[in-house]
Image (cartoon, rainbow, N blue to C red):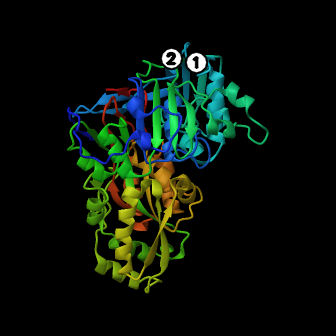
Amino acid sequence: MVGTISRRTMLKAGGSVAVGASMLPFVNVLSANAARGDVLVAVSGQTVNSLDLHRTGTNRPSYQIAVNCYDRLVKFGIKELEDGTKSYDYATIEPDLAESWTTSEDGKTITFILRDDAVFQDGSKVTAEDVKWSFDRAVSVGGFPTVQMKAGGFVRPDQFEAVDEKTFVVKLDFPSKLALPDLAVPVPFVLNSKVAKAHATTDDPWAMEYVHKNTIGSGPFKVIRWDPGEQLVYERNDNWTGGTPAAIKRLILREVPSPATRRALIERGDVQISFDIPNKDAKELAEEEGINVFSTPVENAIHVVGLNYNFEPFQDPNVRKAVAYAIPYEEIYQTAAYGRGRPMWGGEANSDSIAWPQPSPYVTDLDKAKELLAASAFPDGFEVPFSIDLDQVNWMEPTALLIIENLAKLGIKATLEKIPGASWRTASLVEKRLPLHLENFGGWLNYPDYYFFWAYQDGHLFNSSNYKNEEIEALVEATLHAPVDDPDYAPKIKRMIEIAFEDLPRIPLYQPSLNVASNGADGYVYWFHRQLDARPLQVG
């Protein structure tokens, strides 16, 4: 991973649009200008649509609640990069709720011993029974959480046992390189099962409706207010015993759709953090005094064009390849990414590399695109909606418009369709109903087989293209849990990549960077889940 930071020490003097925090349409929260030293205000263009990551349709911005309000058995460490910025450390797994663990010789049984001092936000003790109930929930509710648990080999409630109050045992069907790191991602968070059961019903045995609107964890923060589409307010959980108490008492996260407004707020110092800022702003704000900009390439992530196999023209391989050759890659990279991240086109065909992500062999070649479309079952073109997410409009809209312009040169009429952020995940990933769309997936565990597990396997959440290939299915199954030093591992990964670039359900564009600006805040740490970790933040 590479991180870059531009540091400035003097407050910028004047010049920006006069938009203060008090002008934002929110009520009954502490204004940023009046914030005490233990209150931090952040802005984001993303919409939180649930407080429960396990709920069907919960979007990526909502993952932050699982990160900030709940604990897991284990967690990834934190490391300092060469430039002084901080990042999570995938190579280091540390205790969280579990003070220790042991793995059997055959790698199939992991025994965890819980900390004595771990308590939930209501002060009640965290027990192994709470862990079992939470794991049972994660593997049973279906959708994203259940598939994520499956990646680590956790598929059934009978694999989990609360031996006593402090001892929790996991029994795997087979040893897996993903088992332990999969317990450090946001999904296997531990809930207060006593509170959850009190709000469960026959129709809602996992208390999905209650946890959708309430936090019941043992993490460093709790949500004290959530106004959907406007703001989320975290307050420090003073019962938390999992580490050094957070420096801030409260984090106010305001949803501000306009990038221009968010930029004005961070420039004036009316807010301390602007999260996930556009690449253009990252490039320009890095030159302004008083503002720190963190840009970190997102590991195992690619911005792609999704071609839905349920749409008849995209069932034709010549059509898919025609689209790939029609994409103006370099123009997109400069216009939408402002040269930040890594290009993912123009790679070597049939490369021996198993590094992932890696560039596809496709380049911009309109003549070749026209030849391929002429050889297809749709030589005269067709009409198709091109869908984008309004929460990601800063990169999606310019990208889509540039592609639409080039597709028109082939006779393909694509019409831009903008979908609200709160509905995007359901439309693109749950219902998988978008014929042509932009998508982004970043694999939490840094292996190519893990990326393919999520994005190329039939029915899995990030396979927004409804793609199915029997050989891919078999290759993912064979590699997902295998050690990387297995002699069959590399050849099978190489074959997976070859098939992906031949079948093209997803056309890679570029590897994105996560950009965060701060003005009066310290302690930012980059995380693979691409959400704001409130624990190390402080007003500075």
Identify the amino acid type marked 1. Answer: Val
Q: Is residue 248 left or right of residue 232?
A: left
CA separation in Å, label 2 and label 1: 7 Å
The one nearer the camera, 210 or 303, is 210
Whether residue 214 is visible here, answered yes or no, is yes
Q: Is residue 33 above or below residue 260?
A: above
Q: Residue furthest top?
A: 116
Identify the residue shown where x is 37% and y is 49%. Answer: 261
Q: In x, y percent, where is residue 195?
A: 69, 27
Q: In x, y percent, where is residue 111?
A: 55, 23
Name the residue carrying label 1: 119
Identify the residue shown where x is 59% and y is 50%. Answer: 57
The circle on residue 477 is: none
Q: In x, y percent, where is residue 304?
A: 40, 60
The one nearer the camera, 297 or 497, is 297
The circle on residue 241 is: 2
Identify the residue shown where x is 77% and y is 42%. Answer: 203
Q: Are marks 2 and 1 in contact (CB under 8 Å)?
A: yes
Whether residue 460 is visible here, answered yes or no, is no
Which quadrant does the N terminus fall into?
top left
Q: Is residue 222 above or below residue 392?
A: above
The one nearer the camera, 85 or 314, is 85
Which quadrant does the C terminus fall into?
top left
Quarter of the image for residue 466 reads: bottom right
Q: In x, y percent, where is residue 387?
A: 48, 65
Identify the amino acid type marked 2. Answer: Thr
Helix, strand or loop for disc 2: loop
